Image (tube, rainbow, N blue to C red):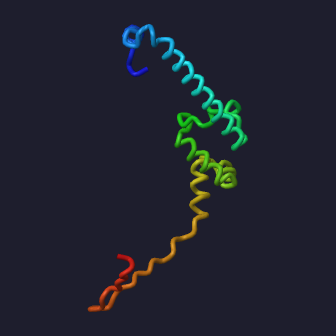
Amino acid sequence: MFGINGPEFILLLLIGILVIGPQRLPEYTQKLTNLVKELRRMASGARDQLKEETGVDLNEVDWRKYDPRQYDPRKIIRDALVDDGTEAAASAAAAGVPAVTAGVAATATVEAPAPARTVERLDAGERAPFDTEAT
């Protein structure tokens, strides 16, 4: 917590008690207690409001499912390639081709060829069109 270890915290606490003084110490202790209670009440209210608006209880959420450390991009790509070409993977497996290669082959055959690119050229001496609203 803020890079403060145990003995340093106790020393700061003792200095704070000496600065505040014994007359004002109960008052500040009560203020700290009220602050902690208010923060707990606000957190509870936010949790209840989230549950009311979304219908999801935070205690029921499986947080491990959202842990980004569990995702391996290579595995995700491999699974996606195998899922896309399951028919091709089954036929390729019979032919002895690995499933990942079959998935790549299945996706490569499905893609349509790129449309031909047309390039419009200006005649010699012709000025390029100029759009005043675009600049």
Furthest residue toward front: 23
Quadrant position of the N terminus in the picture: top left
Q: Position of residue 52 (x, y in %)?
A: 72, 40
Q: Residue at x 53, y 42 (%)?
A: 74
In this rendered view, identify the residue nearer to me: 74 or 10: 10
Residue 87 picture quarter: bottom right
In this rendered view, identify the residue nearer to me: 40 or 23: 23
Horizontally, residue 98 falls left or right of residue 8, namely: right
Furthest residue toward left: 125
Q: Position of residue 92 (x, y in %)?
A: 64, 52
Quadrant position of the C terminus in the picture: bottom left
Relative vertical location of residue 52 with respect to residue 41 in this rendering, above or below = below
Q: Residue at x 68, y 52 (%)?
A: 86
Q: How many marks?
A: 0
Horizontally, residue 88 falls left or right of residue 128, namely: right
Q: Residue at x 34, y 84 (%)?
A: 130
Q: Position of residue 55 (x, y in %)?
A: 73, 41
